[in-house]
Image (cartoon, rainbow, N blue to C red):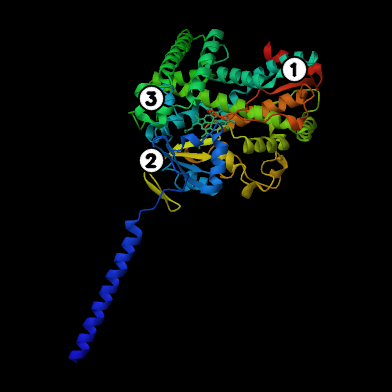
Amino acid sequence: MGLAIIANIMAMALLFTSIYFLCTLFIFLFHSKPPLPPPGPPPLPLIGNLHILGKLPHRTLQSLAKTHGSIMSLKLGQVPTVVISSSQAAELIFKTHDVVFANRAKTEAYDYFSYGFKGIAFAEYGPYWRHVRKLCTSQLLSSSKVEMFGGLRKRVMGSVVKSLEKASASREIVNLSEVLHKLTEDLVFKMTFGSDSNKDDAFNYMELVQEGMALAGAFNIADYLPWLRPFDLQGLTRRLKKCRKAMDEVLEKILKEHEEAHQNQKAEKENGESFIGILLSMMDQPMDLHGHDKQHVIDRTTIKAIIVDMFGAALEANAIVLEWAFSELLRHPRVMKNVQDEIESVVGRNRMVEETDLLNFNYLDLVVKETLRLHPAGALIPRESREDIIMDGYFIEKKSIVLVNSWAIGRDPKVWSDNAETFYPERFLDNKVDVRGQHHQLIPFGSGRRRCVGMQMGLVIIKLVLAQLVHCFDWELPHGISPIDLDMTEKFGLTVPRAKQLLAIPSSRILQSSCRLVSQICYD
Ligand code: HEM
């Protein structure tokens, strides 16, 4: 009996010792070693990995990901950075942990241009951003507003076709890059400030926007080594302050002109038909349109910040996608002919394309998707982590920059097969992958809470401009350049445009009289 008790006690002691040992082992294994950050190239002291990015960072990062993986760590100066290079990893950022990655890294340039992050694109995730975003989607970019600006798009296109007709008659070489940029500028300026805007204001504002874009796209060392900021080594702070001040003066002047016109009841209709008019008509109202949140009110600064953001986002992305789409069509005459044949089968040759025709252009849809796959205007989608997180077994610390390499994801051979680098719109014939952010292998407009708010507007502009210009004209490369030799090099900045201007010769292909008739209607 006594022996049995001793044996029991010993067995219990052994059991407790084993449990204690296992617990200690468990704690040691899982708690003493916190998860590590994702793998990546070793950083240098101070500059981190800045020196390896090169002139085309989206390409460098794509090739680094082949060694280090699709969730990769970098150090940009002193800022921890995570680069995402596969659709599965993108899904973790945009869907699984969307709230954690719903911020954007702040830069000095955006601080100046967005009046201290009061716009939409760089506002801190939270109630303010939510109100501004709702305001933009419901009041400026809803389906009915996209439709409302249809008349403006028609007028602007009419004028472009008219000027290209002249070039066609004299077999002139046209700088298509310039035509597409000017067309987008005209469209976006009139959409933002109204069709009757003062020409001098337009000119001054555009000049400043160009300077602002260059400054926002410039590599600012102080964003990565913040302690250098007071020294302004690159002179960027001085230029940013000057540009912001001048831009604010032009914006104030435009605002006052609109307010006066509104008071004189001269431009009631006009005001309602531009972003600035719509926003001014809501001045001093709560941003939360239901009125639950009285804390945030639409004031002058909010209006200016929204205008600057919307203007920049719409201008740059549309022009660049159009430029790449044209480049690919010129490089692939077979695809160009297919697009022209499709449009002709719906529209004929006796009239110009109308916006209502766009729904019937299925092949054009494939061409636009394929362009956005190979040339997403924002190659690296910037986000920032709002808190420490363990993702896919890796530790990502709060305030890490997250760069989703949508350019690399669109060219991933594991998703897009061996011909991933080839422009081949037919790949989407049996593939239901869409550009709207539901499928993370194709994310030209981003995805999740902070996906692009102007997607619908952007797609209408791109499809309409492409359809009009390839329906009205045949296009030929100048100086006997063969399509396959067309230079497709890129440059990197805020977006990834062509490095060299795109030149081509137009020749009219639809009845001159119908073209002229439409341009006259548009301009009379
Ligand atoms: C083809 C044209 C366009 C492309 C490729 C494009 C692409 C993008 C991308 C990649 C983002 C980041 C999304 C993310 O973080 O998930 C974005 C955001 C944004 N886009 Fe666009 N965009 C286009 C047109 C437009 C237009 C026409 C407008 C406005 C009129 C616009 C306004 C914005 C704004 C305001 C944001 C910031 C949204 C936020 O942070 O909440 N975009 N766009």
Q: Tell me if I can see residue 520 in this picture.
A: yes
Q: Which residue is mark 2?
A: 386
Numbered tag placed on residue 116 in the rendering? 3
Q: Where is residue 252 shown, x and y percent of the image?
A: 44, 12
Quadrant placement of the C terminus: top right
Spatial CA span between label 3 and label 1: 44 Å
Spatial CA span between label 2 and label 1: 51 Å
Marks 3 & 1, CB-CB < 8 Å contact: no
Give the residue at x 58% y 41%.
408
Label 2 neighbourhood size at 10 Å, few (<14), some (14-19), many (20+)?
many
Disc number lying in front (2 or 1): 1
Amino acid found under the numbered disc labelled 3: Gly
Q: Is residue 32 above or below residue 207?
A: below
Label 1 neighbourhood size at 10 Å, few (<14), some (14-19), many (20+)?
some
Closer to the chain start, of discs 3 and 1, is 3
Disc number lying in front (3 or 1): 1
Numbered tag placed on residue 422 in the rendering? none
Amino acid found under the numbered disc labelled 1: Ile
Give the residue at x 43% y 53%.
393
> Is label 2's Cβ within 8 Å of ligand 1?
no
Q: Which residue is mark 1?
A: 173
Q: Is residue 336 left or right of residue 148?
A: right
4 or 493: nearer the viewer: 493
Element type at marker 2? loop
106 or 355: nearer the viewer: 106
Q: Is residue 46 left or right of residue 309?
A: left
The image quadrant of residue 9 is bottom left
Q: Where is residue 62 shown, x and y percent of the image?
A: 56, 42
